[in-house]
Amino acid sequence: MEWRMWLQKIKDWVDGYTVMIDADMYIANRKRREKWDWRSIIDFIYEKDLHKLHNTLCVMCCVAFIGVMLLVVNDLPQYGNVNNPANNEVSVRYVEEGLEETGAVNLVTGMILDYRAFDTFAEANVLFLSVMGVLFLLKTDKKNDDKQQQMVRKKDAEMEAIEQKPIRQIGAKYLTPFILLYGIYIVINGHISPGGGFAGGVIMGGGMIFYATAFGKEKMEQIFTFRSFANISVGSLLTYFVCKSYSFFTGANHVGWEVPKGVAGNILSAGLILPLNICVGLVVACTMYGFYALYTKGDI
Amino acid sequence: MEHINWIHNLPFFSIFIAMFAILLTAMFRTAKMAKRIHMTMMCIVVILSAILTYHMAVAPETFTFTMGHYPAPWGNELTAGPLEALMALVFGTVMLLSVMGGWVFIEKDVLQEKQYLYYIMLDAAMGAMLALIYTNDIFTAYVFIEINTLAACALVLAKGTATAMVGATHYLIMGLLGSGLFLFGVSILYSITGHLLLPQIGEAVTVLAASGQYHFALLIATAFLFIALAIKSGLFPFHTWLPVAHPIAIPASSAILSGFVVKGYVIFAIKLMYSVFSVEFMHELGIIDILFVFGVLGMVFGSLSAMRQRKMKKILAYSSVAQIGYIYMGVGLGTEIGLTAACFHMIAHGFTKSMLFLCAGSFVKQCGNIDDMDQMRGIAYKNPVAGIGYTIGAMSMIGIPLLAGFISKLYFATASIFSEGKMAASLLVLGISMILNALYFLPSVMAIWTTKKGMQEAKRANISPWFITSIVLLLCINVGLGVWYQPVIELIEVGLQLLQK
Amino acid sequence: MGNLGVNFYESASVILFGIGFMNLLLQKNLIKKFIGLNIMDTAVFLFLAAKGFVFGGSAPIIVDGITDASYYVNPVPAGLVLTGIVVAVSVTAFSLALVQRLYQHYGSLNMDVIMRKMKEEEH
């Protein structure tokens, strides 16, 4: 009844299951055929080299894909050429009038937080939503946890207690303030030097993760609870939201008071960019620590 | 302030209200508040979209809204016309009614502590969908597509069971592959045109198409963008995630996912096709024909697979694959009437499929979470509202006159008669798939209305009034669309004309 | 035309994209699959970053008040890459959380094993 098997495989493919499992099961359940017929060739291929065949096909697909893409690259404008289509009036205005219009010395920061601010707003939302999604997946609560998971968590906590070596704790105690300070420096200098909310936020989050690895769950819960996590991230996103909707609304309708730009190069300059950078930095720091905490212990 | 044109602010308001609802829900973090915030937000969005649609019906126009102080090639932009306004209204209504009908299931299936997160995901899906409809910027579209993928994935795994996780993983892998391709397409397009806003890309593409420069790169970029959107919307060869992910979600989620999430991408594809690459250029590249072929294959294969299923929600999921095939066939015909039919079918299918999923979810709940047609014999007598809803919905999908599905099939047939070269194929497939539609819906309808011998007397189940309201409203809309379809069709036609560059 | 020799960054990025795609197809391990997706994303970022470069340009941070466009590279791709990276981080975090839950339930990271176990549980 080989044809039924084949039909089943086609059906399963239409059903959306991967072919590989069914092929495996097909080999396992297959009866040996005494008489020779043409289908045994296919059988032979399946028996001997199914994985190889599949892999070869995949590799060939990918190589063909790479080939096509190399042809595309061959057709694209030259690398580093000034006359490329990408170096048009858009980027020229960003560079030549960016300082005047946004007040930011770092043109990329000026671009993402003022010219194309809607993208960046959406991006901060993606980050927030993903931490909400991780929370949805991994947050444990005592009521709904099954026993096996509780055992695993208990074991993890014991391991954590054993692994708390003094050297790490001393290192964390003295290094974390400096790491956080460095992150804060990058965040608040985002508009006048390389860096910005995202980079600085990641550094601050890294510092918090370092501290948490050294001192463990209980100590961290005294400093940074779920409540403070939610309040800080939602508060900064709300500030971001209010600032940006004000600027979008007034900009589109040509009304309202424009935030003063200040002297370019000072910390207090570039209008709304500094508060926005701080908000983004806080959100990113909270999110990074939130990911770590949820992965390791299922709670913040 | 007299010089503010409030109508032009409506798209901006609706997107930002949805975003605000996310933050507000995250601030309160209780299920009750989350529900209230969500419903208030949805009502406001629907009312705003209705005002915009009414305005567009009276005085059709397209306008752009600069997000910030900087005009077109430099800043972000929103754009709205009759088509966008209508779609926002339809999607908002579908979402509102689905959540209203699905409350009971949300409360039963999602953990009490995590319900507010579910509502956050609903808000995010709505906001991202609105932004995807209104945006005039291809990179913004990419970011919102990602938001939508995350939110939809979270909606799939709301129940928290292991099967839901597997379905969500399938969905996530395919979705992320699609996003990667989309981003690559955007990058190539940016490197050869130097713009990110749709009208400016459109102008640059016209110049490139005339001169023949970078022709191959343009072809591949276009192909990537459309393949990505096809993966996201579940077109036939890339549909594998859809029948896995949609049936295992809770009824409200499946109604929303099948009802409008997959269609937002089609809207964006139509927007790309009309305002960036003109239809003639798409013909020249041959992409439109490929979409047509895939659409036609999807119609047949989706219906054939639906026929083999014994589970009600699986049938509906495969039916969605087939209906997405219809929509892409309309897009692939390349004529204006074909696109009109596709847009109308999106509306009709959105209202019908959400109703069908809600009813099926209600049946499944009553059978004690068993999703098998044999177990559902005579269940319509216990739950008459869902029974009538399911039957009328199935009739609409088959194409019985006076229902919304009939009108879209009528327009598809007209469109295929007026198309050159694709008439025979599309008419034939339309006929075949109509018969197949009837064949796969008939067993389920018969199963719910016929009782087995020796079955106990039908006892009326307790049905929530909100569920009844939502099903009745969806039924009314369905019949209304089937009878007074003319204004909707006119609005779509005007919208498509205004969208053309 | 023939810019393949000049566009070596872009060539590298498309080859990386292909490698990521191959990972996605061939790996059975879910974490490796998602790493493949990450490689694909990173390849696109490399592509974009290469597209922004201009010979003789320095980083787009204004030095000494010079605001001449020829003095700096194109800032647009840098912004796009920044946005893209954040989006990639978010979806990776979400997918890894999903993998963790799957592992908790099925005790395996292999997609085939997971599918087989799921089918067994259904019947």
Image (cartoon, rainbow, N blue to C red):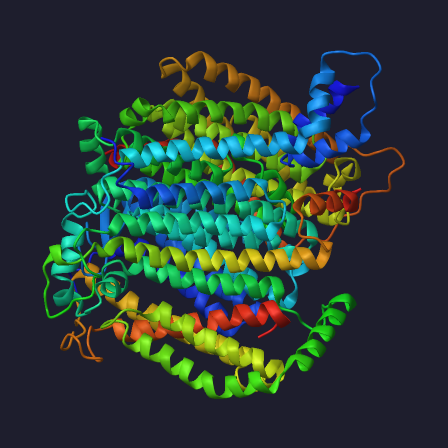
Residue B355 visible here = yes
Up the image or down, B276 lies above or below A104; here it is above
Up the image or down, A281 lies above or below B77; here it is below
Residue B13 visible here = no
Identity of the residue furthest to the right in this view: B454
Residue situated in front as seen by the camera: A52 or C123: A52
Identity of the residue furthest to the front in this view: C5
* Residue B386 horizontal side relative to residue B344, left or right: right
Quarter of the rendering containing residue A24: top right
Residue situated in front as seen by the camera: A197 or A258: A197
Q: Residue at x 71, y 31 (%)?
A: A23
Quarter of the rendering containing residue B391: top right
Residue situated in front as seen by the camera: C111 or B83: C111
Image quadrant holding the C terminus of chain A, namely bottom right
Picture coordinates of residue B435 (x, y %)? 60, 20
Picture coordinates of residue B190 (x, y %)? 27, 44
Q: Residue at x 51, y 57 (%)?
A: C92
Quarter of the rendering containing residue A196: bottom left
Image quadrant holding the N terminus of chain A, namely top right
* Residue C112 horizontal side relative to residue A67, left or right: right
Up the image or down, B279 lies above or below B71; here it is above
Picture coordinates of residue C6 (x, y %)? 26, 40
